[in-house]
Amino acid sequence: MLHRRIHRVIVLAALLLQASCSAITGAESDFERARARWTSQRPAAYDYTLRLSCFCGGEVTRAVVIVVRGNLVESRTYADDGTGVPAQFTGAFPTIDGMFDTIQNAFDHHSARVAVTYDPALGYPVSIALDGAINVADDETSYTLSNFHVR
């Protein structure tokens, strides 16, 4: 009787482990497909608007229009008034490839939550929700990418 219970517990644990691994694998698989789609179709020049939501201050949470040419950022301006983003905040507003690097970093550091929606045509991330650790308050970050245009 005890042997059967131990066997059931081991089987249940194995199934739960497999389910959790397949969920991670699915998200990472979606990521790889989207990144490959983006890499194969990346326009030479584009712009998009990025809104960051976090517990990190007003200048970083304002929507920013990012203009990219040749995978380098040409400009970062606040969407609400057109002023330039101060140099100390520019790292928060990367190219689309930089956004993929942010997602990869979350996977590499085993973030508790990595939820991403991708554009079906070009593969770039449209929304990203990250939570580094479940038991840590205020470490959640989300990104919303909108108004994508090929230049």
Image: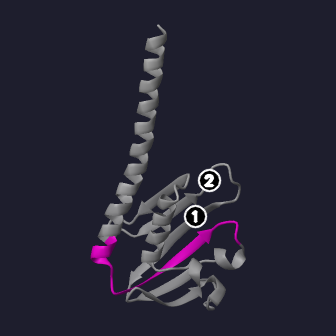
The picture places residue 73, in percent across and down from the top left corner, at 48, 88
Query: Mark 1 belongs to which amino acid?
Result: Ser
Q: Which residue is mark 2?
A: 133
Q: Quadrant of residue 54?
A: bottom right
Q: Which mark is residue 142?
A: 1
Stretch in magenta: 38-56
Taking the image as shown, residue 136 lies to the left or right of residue 37, namely: right
Taking the image as shown, residue 111 lies to the left or right of residue 62, namely: left
The picture places residue 88, in percent across and down from the top left corner, at 65, 85
Give the total number of marks visible in the rendering: 2
Q: Which mark is residue 123?
A: none
The crowd level at tag 2 (other Cα within 10 Å; few <14, some 14-19, many 20+) is: some
Q: CA distance from mark 1 to mark 2?
A: 14 Å
Identified at 35% across, 68% down, the residue is 35
Identified at 51% across, 61% down, the residue is 106
Taking the image as shown, residue 5 lies to the left or right of residue 34, namely: right
Identified at 46% across, 67% down, the residue is 126
Magenta residue check for 123 = no
Of residues 74 and 5, the one drawn nearer to the viewer in this rendering: 5
The picture places residue 1, in percent across and down from the top left corner, at 46, 7
Question: Of marks 1 and 2, which one's residue comes earlier in the chain?
Answer: 2
Mark in front: 1 vs 2: 2
Of residues 107 and 75, the one drawn nearer to the viewer in this rendering: 107
The picture places residue 70, in percent across and down from the top left corner, at 37, 89
Q: As displayed, is residue 102 above or below residue 47?
A: above
